[in-house]
Image (spheres, rainbow, N blue to C red):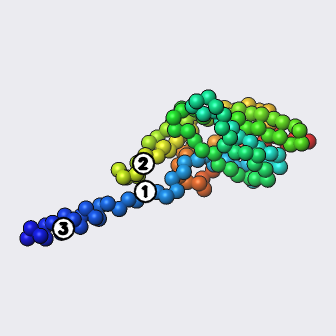
Amino acid sequence: MRRLFYLLFAGLLVACSSIDCPVNNIVAMQYNICNADGSEWKLTDSLTVTTQRSDGSDTILLNRGIDMSAFSLPVSYSHPEDVLCFSLSNFGVKAVDTVWIQKEDIPHFESVDCNVSFFHEIKDLRYTNNGIDSIVINNPSVTYDAETVNFRIYFKTFD
């Protein structure tokens, strides 16, 4: 009887040790580039997106993206507001915009065996209008879902 108890206990320990942490656990904001009518549009200008790290140094999040209609950018989990610098260039014409994204960080637990992830709820959005015509919040919830578009961004055309 005692032996059966130990076998059952060992079986439960083995059964509870499987870790089901998500493999694709990247939390990023998804952007679609759109025309004035809302349809998808390919950016013909070169786009670079930078931000500032906690130590004050700049870092590049998107480097010279061209001929694209969508992109994703990571989200910080240590600041209530992300500040992004969008630089557009097309044959010498350069437009630089700053985008401020205010958000709430929400801890997300899959299992006690997994690291905590942070989902985000977008609360407010501000931006300058040098090269960006407008940005619309499509879905304020930022999670693992890479298919959900969080922002629709409309750029000005430079002729």
Q: Where residue 20 sits in the image (x, y, percent)?
A: 40, 59
Q: Residues within 10 Å of mark 2 (few under 14, many from 20)?
A: few
Q: Return the residue nearer the eye: 79 or 156.
A: 79
| Above or below for 152 versus 131 | below
Q: Please tell me which of labels 1 and 2 falls first in the chain.
A: 1
Please state the horizontal and vertical placement of residue 141, each as a whole percent of the image: 54, 45
Residue with the mark numbered 2: 115
In terms of secondary structure, where does tag 1 sit? loop
Report helix, strand or loop for mark 2.
Answer: loop
Q: Residues within 10 Å of mark 1 (few under 14, many from 20)?
A: some
Q: Is residue 134 left or right of residue 72?
A: right
Specify the amino acid type for callout 2: Asn
**Amino acid carrying mark 3 in the image:** Leu
User: Which mark is first along the chain, 1 or 3?
Assistant: 3
> Where the C terminus falls, by quadrant?
top right
- Tell which of 130 and 133 is nearer to you: 130
**Label 3: element kind:** helix
User: In this figure, which residue is indicated by the disc labeled 1?
Assistant: 21
Decide if residue 3 is on the left or right side of residue 41: left
Distance CA(mark 3)–CA(mark 1): 26 Å
Residue at (54, 51) in percent of width and height: 26
Question: In the image, is residue 80 above or below residue 117?
Answer: above
Residue appearing at x 60%, y 44% in the figure: 74
Q: Residue furthest right?
A: 159
Q: Residue at x 50, y 44 (%)?
A: 119
Please say if the residues under marks 1 and 2 sit with CB atoms less than 8 Å apart: yes
Q: Residues within 10 Å of mark 3 (few under 14, many from 20)?
A: few
Q: Which mark is residue 8?
A: 3
Relative to 157, 97 lies left or right = left
Identify residue type, mark 1. Cys
